[in-house]
Image (cartoon, helix red, strand yellow):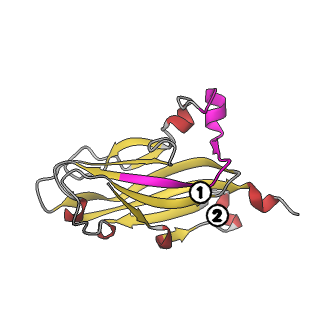
Amino acid sequence: MANIDVTSKLVKGPAANNEVGRGWTHKLEIDFNDFVANPSATDGDTLTFACFTIPAYATVTDVGFRVVTAFDDSGGGSSLTVILGDEDDDNGYVISKQIHVDGTEVFVGVNDGAYFTGTDSGSATLANALKGKTYTAAKTIEVLFTPTSYKLDECTAGKIVIWANIIDTNILVTN
């Protein structure tokens, strides 16, 4: 498994005040060109992208994705799944979704991971889960791509937009 930091590609985040009302403070676009060649990769290796930094004492209330263009590859691959989570639970925000053109691709995934369904051990009730996850230490929202029977650098098409609503309570605190 390879890890890639793509925070330098951050399209927006944090958003302007007039955009926060729409529910998303951070947005990141990832396309097939970001699946750089990895000489040690073998067929089916997962590629992890570090998307958004979550400061300590921030709350994440929404995380999702939208596939702009379904992913395709140059070989015989027929499956590419995506999940969104953090270092504690790799699919805590969005569970596995198919995004390959040869599969039954899912174009939108939002808030169906354990952090939002009340199935996470840190969320005592569904009511707590629906409020999101509050962090006591800095973490990173990650997106994981897993192909079946091919390498990700064989992709020839595909674009996905990842978004999140991160409420940074640190900006409300004054000394």
Q: Quadrant of the C terminus?
A: bottom right
Most distant residue in the right direction: 175
Camera sees residue 23: no
| Crowding at mark 1 (Cα within 10 Å: few <14, some 14-19, many 20+) | many
Q: Amino acid at mark 2?
A: Glu
Residue placed most toward the observer, 101 or 154: 154
Q: Which residue is mark 2?
A: 19
Q: Is disc 1 in contact with disc 2, using a CB cutoff of under 8 Å? A: yes
Q: Quote the CA–CA distance across marks 1 and 2.
A: 7 Å
Mark number, residue 24: 1
Residue at image position (30%, 52%) is 46
Q: Is residue 13 above or below residue 147?
A: below
Q: Which residues are magenta?
A: 122-144
Foreground mark, 1 or 2?
Answer: 1
In the picture shown, does residue 61 fall above or below 116? below
Earlier in the chain: of badge 1 and badge 2, it is: 2
Split into 4 quadrants, where in the image is the N terminus? Answer: bottom left
Label 2 Cα neighbours within 10 Å, binned few <14 / some 14-19 / many ≥20: few
Percent x, y of residue 172: 81, 59
Residue 151 in the image: x percent, y percent? 20, 58
Seen at 57% across and 48% down, the residue is: 62
Image location (x, y in percent) of residue 108: 41, 48
Where disc 1 sits, the SS reads: loop
Report the side of 123 relative to 33 (left or right).
Answer: right
Give the SS element for disc 2. Answer: helix
